[in-house]
Image: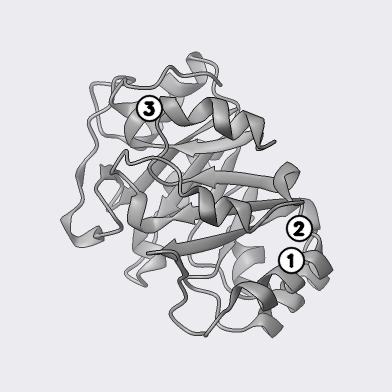
Amino acid sequence: MIIPVLDIKSSIAVSGKSGNRDEYQPLETVFSPSSHPLEIARALKERGAQEIYIADLDAIENKGSNRDLVGKINQVLPVMLDCGACDPESVTEALKFADKVIVATETLKSMDDLQQIFSRVKRQQIIISIDLVQDQIYSRNMDLDWENLRETLERLKPSQIIILDISQVGTRKGVNWDVVDRFSGLESTVILGGGITGSDLEEITRKGVAKILVGTALHSGQMEPSF
């Protein structure tokens, strides 16, 4: 199942490449003549989308937030929201505006905070995002290695795990299969994102991954909206 992606900045849907957020431009999408996120979400629902991934770039960068707009979108489509939530309080606050909240390695401050989140928030409302840059786990605040991260995931048993290759976003270069193979045995919980193209779909299915995040290829019309 394709989960459409919207990046929101200053109340506008934007697009860019490789996580260079200062260079993002208003999104041009085949689903709407407007870059307004609410209008795009309504159009996606009409086409059959069942949920939507939203990155609130302002909140992630600590430059404000778009949470009221996210709340309106959540009334149209269930939102999985990345807003930089990194502790039980910020996750709980974000859940006032979204169906599920993403806790990303990019903004997580400590593994203790992650443990606290899972002890205080319903597991079904939490999605862990493993953010990657050039094959390395990306975090602003921690040094993370694959072995310890895998042990943590197996202990916490999250209902969903996003593998998001930030350096691939918007590039249409395809899936980094070496990274996907590191999550062997966890495929049923994985949501894959970053540079996915239509040519990747057969292999993604073969590997047992049921959900993917698609932005550029979907909004440009290069990938059929199979929701």
Residue 152 sits in which quadrant? Answer: bottom right
* Sequence order check, earlier mark of 3 and 1: 1
- Indicate whether 150 appears above or below 164: below
| Label at residue 35 | none
Residue 77 shows up from this direction: no
* Sequence order check, earlier mark of 3 and 2: 2
- Indicate whether 56 appears above or below 204: below
Q: What's the distance in space between the residues labelled 3 and 2, CA to CA?
A: 27 Å
For the C terminus, the image quarter is top right
Q: Residue 96, how many percent across, how many down? A: 62, 54
Q: Residue 80, how many percent across, how many down? A: 57, 46
Tag 3, which secondary structure?
helix
Q: What's the distance in space between the residues labelled 2 and 1, CA to CA?
A: 7 Å
- Scheme of image coloration: one colour
Q: In the drawing, does residue 104 fall left or right of residue 189?
A: left
Mark 3, residues whose alpha carbon is within 10 Å: few (<14), some, or many (≥20)? many
Q: Name the amino acid, label 1.
A: Leu
Asked whether the residues under the numbered discs 2 and 1 touch, taking CB atoms below 8 Å apart as contact, a structural biologist would say yes
Q: 210 or 81, which lies in front?
A: 210
Tag 2, which secondary structure?
loop
| Label at residue 153 | 1
Which residue corresponds to mark 3? Answer: 218
Asked whether the residues under the numbered discs 3 and 1 touch, taking CB atoms below 8 Å apart as contact, a structural biologist would say no
Q: Residue 127, how many percent across, how many down? A: 65, 55
- Mark 3 or mark 1, whichever is nearer to me: 1
Identified at 34% across, 62% down, the residue is 58
Q: Name the amino acid, label 2.
A: Pro
Q: Residue 102, how many percent across, how many down? A: 58, 57
| Label at residue 158 | 2
